[in-house]
Amino acid sequence: MVRAFSVIAQLLLVALPLLLVMPSLFQFSGGSIQPWLEPLFSSLLLTITTTLLAAYLALQAAQYSLVRFSRLTAILSLPHVAFAVGLMFLLSPSGYLVRIIEAVTGWLPSPPVGWPLPEKSMVTLTLVLVAKEVPFLLLMIAAQLRQLPYQRWLLQAQSLGWSRSRSWWLIVVPALLPRLKFPLAAIAIYTVSVVDIPLLVGPNTPGVLAMVIFEQQYQFNQAGSIMVGVGLLIAAGVLLLAFNAASIRMFLRFSQRQRRVKTKSPRFGWTAGISVRSVLVVVSWLVLALLLLHSIAGGWFYPDLVPNNWQWQRWVKEWPYIQPLLWTSFWLAVVSALLGLIAAVAVLEWQRQRQQRQLKVWPLLMLLIPQLVLVLGWQQSFGQGSQGPALVWSHTVFCFPYAYLVLHGAWVNYDERWLYQAQSLGYSYWQSWWRILLPMLKAPLLMAFAVAFSVSIAQYLPTQWLAGGTLPTLTTETVSIAAGGDWRLASVYALMQAALPMLVLLGLIFFVDDIRLTDAAD
Amino acid sequence: MKALLFMLLAVVSLGTMANSQTVYFYAWGGNPAVNDYLRWAARELKQQDIDLRHVKVADIAEVVKQLTDGRSNADLVWINGENFHALKSAGKLQSIVADIDNTGKLRDALNWRVDFGEPVDGLEVPWGVGQFHLLSCQRCISGSQISAEELLIYAERNPGKISYPKPPEFHGTTFLKALLLSLSERREVFQQPVAEVDAQQLTQPLWNYLQRLHPLIWQQAENFPASAAEQLNWFANGALDVAVSFNPNEAQTLVQQGRIPENTQRVVLGEAAVTNHHYLAIPTTAQQAEAAREVINFMLSDKAQRRKARLDGWGDPAVIELTDSGTPTLLPVAADFHASWQAYLEQAWLERFQ
């Protein structure tokens, strides 16, 4: 039965989505590859830099102590775009940091022209993406570390005279990295296919590949030619997955060689690894605070440190319009997160029973294909105005792999002896599964639900392109309001959008005592 | 279990769309003042048993594409220019002008019967007026007009402070048109389709001009604002000295909304403002075409048009003659280019500067 469930889940949530994309891929009508090469190059550069940097920073931060999960709640639940805007409120040439410099020194009466983080640039784009991916990676590292006796390894290595950083990078990281292969791959694929963030802070002459595809999608005069871009996007995805696997292998070989070297060198990273973590936490709360301030601000212009006047009534006025959106978003997220979770449990249970401990590609496949390609294909198969069921299905397709990722470690490493013991006391197999295993895995289950829930909340492309505005959610409204650039109003929506996952995450932290993604180390 | 949850969701979604007279109005959702206006209109229309749903889109072209592909639930759309052109040539619009009450009062002087050189042919009804101009601060560009050459001099004195939305964003493309008009002797020729004139020779002054201008503008033209809204934010914070606008009253309405500083004024680029209309249209596939016509009737009523022009709201000029109109005067009018120039200018710009 488990097998049947597992197969059905994967058929519905992996095979079917793939099948539905196929027809659109065969509409390949040709066209020149030339105009796509520069966007392709920027996309590859962006993705490789972002993934490597995020991996390095997360591993560096994890070395000192695992982040207490609750501190990252803000950054994890803020939608990407809201986070990007908040970060620009903080760091752009007219941002808060520059305003403070101006207030103290008086040197910058107008926003500085050569500021290292301009409103739009590759550097800004990379920074935003890295800052948003590191917390996700920390979560994944914490989940995987729980399966390794790494504290013992560290102790042993240090008792042999190795520095802590050397022991971490040469002993723990090589064991950890292969387990992070898929989370890193998911980050790479997300980065290569993300559209909304590059539109906001990315360069635009010409810009990254996914963004150019998105923009050209609606240019009437060049209908067929975006398929060249889509083809390149798929190729870039494959290339990046190969690069990801290859760089992990390279690091393993490198660390193997380094382990034999007797000297104390090399030093990896700076010792104040704690700073990565603190910076992230501080920045995420500052971003949240700035969004809040903007949501109640009247006019507020450079170089003022506080708004000229306040407009509290914006919240009151918008609330009646936000309320129904909250409900739609909430229901969609609850249903698709639950379905995704059940599917993940079915697949993992089948894996557990057959003692397959590694992460499998197949359940994660939907994270490894650019979302833009998938949704474009589905739209052509379904048509617009598809309601409820199609929409829930499309969200579930993306909730499922994340639930699988989060749940995987705890599930496949569940100690089978608990079940034997229960059975020896007279329970049937399924009774003991239900009464012993499930309660024991309550924490990771709820965690997986929370992550799947926030994944559903964040879905823009499937919601907008499949439901065609008949089922507006907080996210689709936030995006269209944000298009108008009035971030005082858009902040209200973005904060409400963040509120749902944040409530779920906070609920978890308060009501489940053993949500300890951290170990005693913290 | 799954079936149960699906049903639950179906009930939830059905509950929100019980009314049979629901009109799905696809319109740009980025301007809070417009959104507020449409909320007001929806409340008014409730009395006629019409449930007006503003489906907010980030770009109306999404819907145009879906309509031409034959997959859309739109009953009413807010369009003009290129988008109208695409829908008209795909035969996706109903002929409606004859059925609308207030068309007799439309201000003919502004020539609404031609939308970017394309005859309206009764397929869309004007809703408001757009006039392209710049917003600038009082200590930045002085005077109410600036020619292309003067703008270049300004950019030389204030490097990095000028920019424009990246074409094919329509404000950006209109910026190019305004420059081209300012740089050209023969202005009427742009009313003709590109194919009928020597476009390359006519536009050469523009490309030469931009070669000189670009090194002097924001980020040396390596990047551009993605939209007029984005540029407006940078302008509001003093990172740029100009913003672009299509609403001739926006210098006032945006100040009232606290979106831009108080010392903002409007500046015409060239001798007159490139002027066009934005329209309402009903797709052939509309399921509530009758109710959608009622909505248009309402939108063209004195009451709705007067409300639309209010400076504490949207501030969009009325398209009908209003006797007691207290709204500010329009800018000097320059007719917009024929629609075929849009794609030509965009393409030529992208080839040179992207």
Image: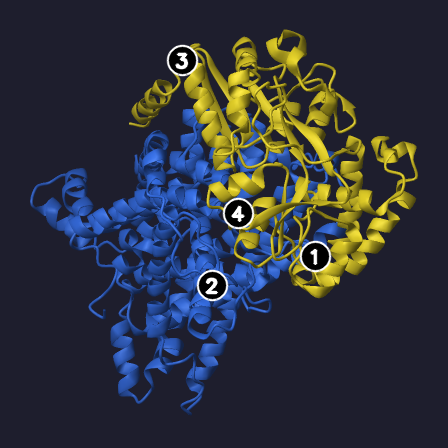
Going by the numbered disc 1, the residue's amino acid type is Glu
In contact (CB < 8 Å): disc 3 and disc 4: no
In contact (CB < 8 Å): disc 4 and disc 1: no
Say if labels 3 and 4 share a chain.
no
Name the residue: 77% across, 48% down: B349
**Label ID, residue A38:** 1
- Classify 10 Å Cα crowding around label 2: few (below 14), some (14-19), many (20 and above): many
**Label ID, residue A91:** 2
Residue holding disc 3: B19
- Classify 10 Å Cα crowding around label 3: few (below 14), some (14-19), many (20 and above): few
Quick check: A353 above or below B223?
above
Q: Is residue B169 visible?
A: no
Residue holding disc 4: A196
Q: Split into 4 quadrants, where in the image is the N terminus of chain A?
A: top left
Which chain does the blue colour mark? A
Disc on the earlier residue, 4 or 1: 1
The chain carrying label 1 is A
The chain carrying label 3 is B
Task: Name chain B's colour.
Answer: yellow
Between B253 and A414, the one lying in front of the other is B253
In contact (CB < 8 Å): disc 2 and disc 4: no
Mark 1 or mark 3, whichever is nearer to me: 3
State the image coordinates of residue A213 (x, y, percent, origin top left): 64, 44
In contact (CB < 8 Å): disc 1 and disc 3: no
